Image (tube, rainbow, N blue to C red):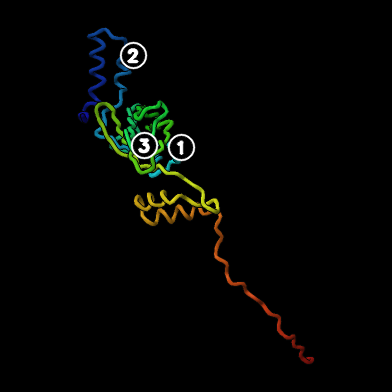
């Protein structure tokens, strides 16, 4: 719930009154007065992991990283972030062996879904992300793809299934980018060589 405009100024006075009435330690008033204000809303920024392609054979995956911010784009430390993977189909597990993982944001407002490993099912899936701080919540999704990455004849190909998935997710442009980046063995087209022929030398008379 959003704080009142005068809440920041009233809080220290209320803390002093409570300290006097309840006989609490003096340090309690200072700690309570410095408590961060309740944000009006939360924003979840996806730092890493969106659109990642996970190698099913090696069970590797890109660890999602998110940043939690307030309405003024200031990072929020200590926010609770919950990552949730699908229970079936293309999915994976986190470092704790489960499909849910709760983390706290650091001083930069970031939380990492540590140890994400892809399962053996190919296809696109979404990671649900929920953040909460002092009763304010927000949610978003991170889309990733599980695929079998195989080498082509020249060592730079990709699987036909992966091409189909990319075409469904991002269109032909995404397929072209991946083929270009993975086609390390391809050579540029041969250009027609330029031939320079020596002519018959001509010697003129004296000038």
Vertical order, 137 against 17 (above or below): below
Q: How far apart are marks 3 and 1 (CA)?
A: 12 Å
Q: Nearer the viewer, residue 204 or 172?
A: 172
What residue do we see at 26% from left, 15% from top?
16
Determine whether the residue tagged by mark 2 lies in a helix, strand or loop. helix
Provide the residue designation for mark 2: 27
Q: Are marks 1 and 2 in contact (CB under 8 Å)?
A: no
Q: Nearer the viewer, mark 2 or mark 3?
A: 3
Tell me the tag on residue 117. none
What residue do we see at 54% from left, 53% from top?
153
What residue do we see at 42% from left, 33% from top?
116
Describe residue 87's horizontal placement relative to residue 196 as left or right: left
Of the two numbered discs 2 and 3 on the same chain, state the one appearing first in sequence. Answer: 2
Vertical order, 194 against 178 (above or below): below
Q: Quadrant of the N terminus?
A: top left
Q: Which of 207 and 58 is in front in this view?
A: 58
Vertical order, 116 against 188 (above or below): above
Q: Nearer the viewer, residue 134 or 48?
A: 48
Determine whether the residue tagged by mark 1 lies in a helix, strand or loop. loop
Image quadrant in which you'd find residue 42: top left
Percent across and percent down for residue 68 are 33, 34
Tell me the tag on residue 91. 3
Query: Are there few (<14), some (14-19), or many (20+) residues within 10 Å of tag 3?
Result: many
Tell me the tag on residue 60. 1
Query: Are there few (<14), some (14-19), or many (20+) residues within 10 Å of tag 2?
Result: few
């Amino acid at each position: 719930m959003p704080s009142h405009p005068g809440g920041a100024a009233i809080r220290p006075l209320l803390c002093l009154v409570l300290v006097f009435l309840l006989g609490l330690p003096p340090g309690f008033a200072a700690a309570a007065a410095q408590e961060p204000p309740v944000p009006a809303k939360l924003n979840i920024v996806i730092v890493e992991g969106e659109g990642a392609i996970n190698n099913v054979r090696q069970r590797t995956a890109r660890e999602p990283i998110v940043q939690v911010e307030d309405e003024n784009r200031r990072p929020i430390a200590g926010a609770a972030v919950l990552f949730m993977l699908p229970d079936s189909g293309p999915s994976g597990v986190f470092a704790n062996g489960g499909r849910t993982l709760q983390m706290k944001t650091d001083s930069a407002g970031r939380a990492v879904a540590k140890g994400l490993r892809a399962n053996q099912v190919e296809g696109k899936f979404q990671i649900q992300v929920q953040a909460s701080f002092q009763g304010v919540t927000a949610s978003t999704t991170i889309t990733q793809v599980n695929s079998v990455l195989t080498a082509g004849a020249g060592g730079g190909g990709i699987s036909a299934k992966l091409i189909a998935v990319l075409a469904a997710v991002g269109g032909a442009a995404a397929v072209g980018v991946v083929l270009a980046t993975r086609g390390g063995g391809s050579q540029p087209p041969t250009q027609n060589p330029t031939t320079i022929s020596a002519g018959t030398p001509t010697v003129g008379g004296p000038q």
